[in-house]
Structures are given as C-alpha cells and as structure tokens.
Image (spheres, helix red, strand yellow):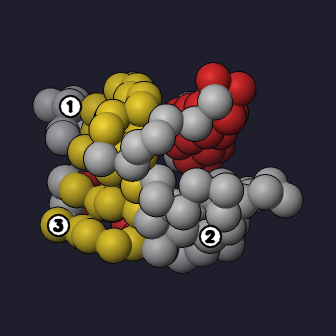
C-alpha cells in the first residue's frame, strides 16, 4: 500500500471521543457527520487500538483496495491532533479520482466531524 494523501488537523475533542466517533459514527444521532455520497459506502473498522488508532476499509466501491488510517495523538490541551492517511494499492488512480478521494476525506473528517464537536 502506498500513501496517496494525508492531512493533520486539530479536533477539539479528546482522543477517546474521536476514537468512538470513528468506530461508531452513528453513536450520537444528534451529531450526524458521516454523510455519504452516492458513490460511497459505509466503511468498516478493520483495526482499532484505543484510543490512538483507527483503520477503515474503503468507502469507495471504485477503489475497494483503499484504506484510511487515523492516528489520534492528544494535543496536550484536551483535544486531538487527528491525522488521516489514505493508502492505496497500485496502480494509482487517475488524478481526478485521487483528488476526489482526498477532498472527501478532508470534508468528512476536517469538516463535518470537526464541526460536530462545535468547531
């Protein structure tokens, strides 16, 4: 698997809360954030180490080999310096598809998930 993209951004919630949100996205129905597009499917958690690591299966039927790794280190101020990494097998996707995959992860994790915690 090759790294195809990565982003790090602070989340206001502590690692154990982010861990729960990633491993059970529907846990709190008052904070929906994993809103999928027509070309996406709900990912499964394929690896988890509480509270600092979650790995998802692919969200994209077009790229079933895709894996998303979430590293969840504490930021020292009560939040999490969440880093997502998109991993793909060879061959790499076309530039347009790769851009779409990265953008969607960034929208979901650094947009919708982050806003679900009030930021």
Q: Is residue 46 above or below residue 3?
A: below
Closer to viewer: mark 2 or mark 3: 2
Q: How many residues crowd around disc 1 within 10 Å: few (fewer than 14), some, or many (20 or more)?
A: some
What residue is pinned by disc 1? 75
Closer to viewer: mark 1 or mark 3: 3
Q: Residue at x 62, y 70 (%)?
A: 42
- Of residue 17 and residue 109, the one placed in the foreground of this image is 109
Compared across the picture, whether 95 is left or right of 16 comes to: right
- Residue 24: where, in percent of width, then height? 47, 74
- Label 2 close to label 1 by CB (< 8 Å): no
SS label for mark 2: loop
Q: Which residue is outermost to the right?
A: 38
**Res. 49 mark:** 3
- Of residue 81 and residue 107, the one placed in the foreground of this image is 107
Q: How many residues crowd around disc 2 within 10 Å: few (fewer than 14), some, or many (20 or more)?
A: some
Compared across the picture, whether 73 is left or right of 30 comes to: left
Q: Earlier in the sequence, mark 2 or mark 1?
A: 2
- Residue 15: where, in percent of width, then height? 26, 51
């Amino acid at each position: 698997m090759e790294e195809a993209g990565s982003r790090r951004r602070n989340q206001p919630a502590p690692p154990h809360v982010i861990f729960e949100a990633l491993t059970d996205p529907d846990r709190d129905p008052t904070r929906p954030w994993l809103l999928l597009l027509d070309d996406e499917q709900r990912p499964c958690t394929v690896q988890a180490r509480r509270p600092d690591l979650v790995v998802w299966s692919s969200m994209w039927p077009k790229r079933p080999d895709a894996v998303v790794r979430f590293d969840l280190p504490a930021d020292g101020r009560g939040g999490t310096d969440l880093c997502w990494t998109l991993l793909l097998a060879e061959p790499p996707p076309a530039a347009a598809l790769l851009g779409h995959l990265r953008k969607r992860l960034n929208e979901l994790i650094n947009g919708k998930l982050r806003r679900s915690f009030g930021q």
